[in-house]
Image (cartoon, rainbow, N blue to C red):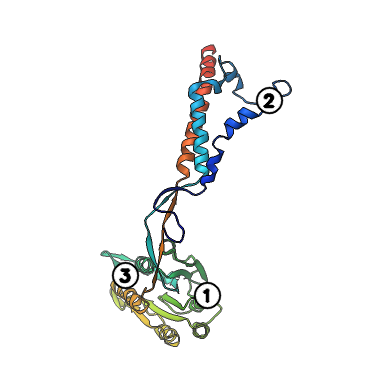
């Protein structure tokens, strides 16, 4: 057992609810039957079909057995059956880590190769950064998406899998077509300043320069430095490359707008580092370096995963109740069809 948790296997969270099992029998045994005279308050559309049978529908052995099973299953579902798994150990680092990912219009530039296919920059970032996020077991990881404005897509959470999924679901232009680097840093400072984590880290990934927002990048960096935040910056985009167009081949630089000077200044001021990702392989190596710079080393916390199983008896009770109703209605339906 872990911290008073039940041992591995099947258990009932609210086992005391099983005391309700004899309730229908007690009601039938001790309460007087309702009077037959008087105005009926409940109208049952198919009452005539049931009344036409030789015996009451609850007096039929099969229906009575089904109804009894339904009650047993409902009480069992209410008692919350659970499966308690084997003990798992989770690292706990005390680190808060935010990823700020640029989803402005320029991230749609197709100058990256992934699995031998030309793709845009965001596609590569989703794959590599998503894998990085899922490796951060023990960190509280959050996600900021920014374009013309910065938005908190995922608050700080230990659920790294969900954070990676939300990154994968992000779309170019969702936050606007321009780039608000300063706002992204400012939002990260706001989210991290009141947290008690021993280490607060921001990984900022962009392919351009600050062209929008309320706060300038270096101004936001000063706020971050005063709060003790470490910022790692990553510049994304290929170097000069040959492209084919209507006039033939020409040399272009898809990363001409990348403001490396500002990104280097941001990292230097906060004690972080600047990285340049010119292709998918370089970006993957950068995140491997970040794993080394910010390693996941910590004490282990033991937990037992618990899966709720109430929906199984609840579903079976619904199916059996539907079966009992159809069985009770069947004689009346046959008579109605024969009369027609």
Callout 2 crowding tier (Cα within 10 Å): few <14, some 14–19, many ≥20: few
Residue 134 spot, x, y in % from top left:
37, 65
Q: Is residue 84 visible?
A: yes
Residue in the foreground of this view, choosing between 256 and 248: 256
Q: Is residue 95 above or below residue 225?
A: above
Mark 1 or mark 2, earlier in chain = 2
Q: Is residue 103 visible?
A: no
Classify residue 139 as left or right of residue 74.
left
Callout 3 crowding tier (Cα within 10 Å): few <14, some 14–19, many ≥20: many
Total marks placed: 3
- The residue furthest top is 339
Asked if labels 3 and 2 touch by Cβ distance under 8 angstroms, the answer is: no
- The quadrant in which the N terminus is found is bottom left
**Element at label 2:** loop
Q: Is residue 303 above or below residue 198?
A: above
Pointer 2: what residue?
34
- The residue furthest right is 38
**Element at label 3:** strand
Mark 2 or mark 3, earlier in chain = 2
Pointer 1: what residue?
195
- The residue under the point 48% across, 71% down is 147
Pointer 3: what residue?
112
Classify residue 27 as left or right of residue 187.
right
Residue 18 spot, x, y in % from top left:
52, 41
Residue mark closest to the camera, 2 vs 3: 2
- The residue furthest left is 116
Mark 1 or mark 3, earlier in chain = 3
The span from disc 1 to disc 3 (Cα, nearest Å) is: 37 Å
The span from disc 1 to disc 2 (Cα, nearest Å) is: 62 Å
Q: Is residue 85 above or below residue 32?
A: below
Callout 1 crowding tier (Cα within 10 Å): few <14, some 14–19, many ≥20: few
Residue mark closest to the camera, 1 vs 3: 1
């Amino acid at each position: 057992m872990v911290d008073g948790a039940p041992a591995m296997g099947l258990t009932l969270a609210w086992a005391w609810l099983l005391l309700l099992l004899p309730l229908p029998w007690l009601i039938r045994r001790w309460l007087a039957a309702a009077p037959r005279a008087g105005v009926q308050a409940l109208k049952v559309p198919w009452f005539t079909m049931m009344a036409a049978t030789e015996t009451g529908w609850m007096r039929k052995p099969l229906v009575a057995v089904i109804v009894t099973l339904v009650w047993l299953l409902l009480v069992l579902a209410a008692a919350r059956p659970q499966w308690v798994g084997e003990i798992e150990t989770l690292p706990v680092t005390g680190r808060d880590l935010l990823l700020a990912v640029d989803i402005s219009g320029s991230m749609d530039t197709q100058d990256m190769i992934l699995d031998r296919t030309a793709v845009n920059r965001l596609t590569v970032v989703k794959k590599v950064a998503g894998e990085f996020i899922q490796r951060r077991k023990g960190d509280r990881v959050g996600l900021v998406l920014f374009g013309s404005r910065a938005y908190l897509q995922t608050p700080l959470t230990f659920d790294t899998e969900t954070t990676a999924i939300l990154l994968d679901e992000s779309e170019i232009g969702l936050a606007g077509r321009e780039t608000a680097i300063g706002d992204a840093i400012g939002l990260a400072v706001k989210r991290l300043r009141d947290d008690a984590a021993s280490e607060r880290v921001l990984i900022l990934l962009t392919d351009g320069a600050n062209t929008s927002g309320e706060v300038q990048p270096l101004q936001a960096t000063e706020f971050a430095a005063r709060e003790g935040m470490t910022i790692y910056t990553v510049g994304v985009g290929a170097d000069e490359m040959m492209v084919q167009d209507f006039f033939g081949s020409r040399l272009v630089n898809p990363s001409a707008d990348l403001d490396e000077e500002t990104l280097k200044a941001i990292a230097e001021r906060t004690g972080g580092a600047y990285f340049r990702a010119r292709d998918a392989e370089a970006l993957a190596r950068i995140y491997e370096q970040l794993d080394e710079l910010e390693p996941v080393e910590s004490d282990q916390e033991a937990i037992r995963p618990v899966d709720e199983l109430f929906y199984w008896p609840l579903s079976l009770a619904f199916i059996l109740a539907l079966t009992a109703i159809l069985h009770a209605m069947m004689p009346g339906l046959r008579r109605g069809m024969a009369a027609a």
